Amino acid sequence: MLFNLVEYLRDWLTRNDLYRWVMIIDQREFRVLAAALLSFAIVLVFGKRVIRWLTSKKIGDQAKFDVKALEDANAGKANTPTMGGLLIAAAIGVSTLLLADMRNTYVQLALIVLVWLAAVGGADDWLKLTASSRGSNSRQGLYAWEKLVFQVGIGLLAGYFAYRAGFTVNADKSLAHVVNLPFQKTYANSLSGPNPSLLYWEIGGYTILMLLMMTGMSNAVNITDGMDGLAGGVSAVVAFGLTILCLIAGSEDLAKFLLVPYVSTAQELAVVTGALAGACLGFLWWNCSPASVFMGDTGSLCLGGLLGYIAVVIRQDFVLLVMSAVFVIEIASVMIQVSYFKWTKGKRVFRCAPYHWHLRMGGWPEQRIVARFWIMSVIAVAVGLATLKLR
């Protein structure tokens, strides 16, 4: 809104020699950094108040494990407030509204994804955490199929409207709909607009990819959220890498130089990823060990969904998977464990899934697991960014 206000008042500000005082708002890189700092500050300032409110409502962690050793190890976390994702979602939303160009369709869709998935996660958290006060027969959160329906729904909507947005500005130069395979070279100006004979196939493929990435990433972050600072720290690192990719994808010169898809106006999404990184860092202030609050599904679903959505828009879905190696390992460990357990009728590959609990049961201290997963994420982001030149 600040950016749009400055744009609206530009002529008046210039005539009155006031524009020089606000011209920095026009610099996208400044707005990216400002969004990160603002979202960090919002979480930091309002964190204690939100934690007190959640505590007063008795919205505390009631995590249950099938393994007694994990129950004992996490006994000290009982009743720690959760739904701290409210802080994350609010900080990202406010920072984006203030500092991003709200005329940008990609930014508008990002906010819809944020609110939608935060609401789904919030409903799930609320049902789980207030079940005891509503009676023994109360629902323990949303059913898995209900969450999946909402995730698929927003994936389809975001995919369809993001595809349409690719034709609005510089469609003759943009590669917003190109299939970007690993290590593939792409070139600006290589498309001349939509191909009518392939349009429905393109829309379908793009939308399905969006659906899979958003659903997969939101569930991956949700599964990873189990130790103090784990999901928040990894999300902050991945968001930093995605910010760089947004700035590259939205710049015709940089995209052409690096031979990656140029997606017109997508650089404005860097403000969103900057806000996401800042909000996660601010949340770590309260979530680092020993955690004062957990993000819950409210935070994890919207974080993963946003990361997946933005990666598809800028045509860097493969690079996101590389940068999100920790998230991929975590969700893969659950899929392997469940599949092998059913196939062998009771045998397990891991001591417990997701993988961070396997390590915990192997004797690793929680802080060591979290720190090493952070390090893995930094390396994965570096590798992901390096692949831009390995083509």
Image (tube, rainbow, N blue to C red):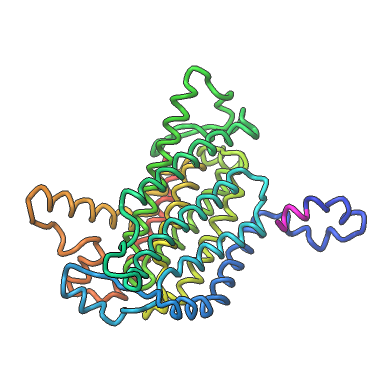
Q: Is residue 216 left or right of residue 2?
A: left
Total numbered badges shown on the rendered structure = 0
Instruction: Return the residue nearer the eye: 293 or 290.
Output: 293
Relative to 123, is 203 above or below?
above
State the predominant SS element of the stretch in magenta: helix
> Which residue is pictured at 20% across the width and 79% down the height?
72
| Image quarter (top left, top right, bottom left or bottom right) of the N terminus | bottom right
- Residue 5 part of the magenta segment: yes
Residue 172 visible within the image? yes
Instruction: Return the residue nearer the eye: 325 or 144.
Output: 144
Residue 42's image quarter?
Answer: bottom right
Q: Is residue 379 left or right of residue 187?
A: left
Residue extending furthest toward the right: 15
Give the x, y percent position of residue 5: 76, 55
Give the x, y percent position of residue 279: 52, 66
Per the rendered image, the range of residues in magenta is 1-6
Q: Is residue 33 left or right of residue 344?
A: right
Instruction: Return the residue nearer the eye: 358 or 82.
Output: 82
Q: Is residue 194 left or right of residue 19?
A: left
Instruction: Return the residue nearer the eye: 215 or 193.
Output: 215
- Residue 291 part of the magenta segment: no
Relative to 285, is 111 above or below?
above
| Image quarter (top left, top right, bottom left or bottom right) of the C terminus | top left
Give the x, y percent position of residue 350: 16, 60
Residue extending furthest toward the top: 197
Residue 389 visible within the image? no
> Which residue is pictured at 41% across the width and 50% down the height?
384
Give the x, y percent position of residue 46: 56, 75
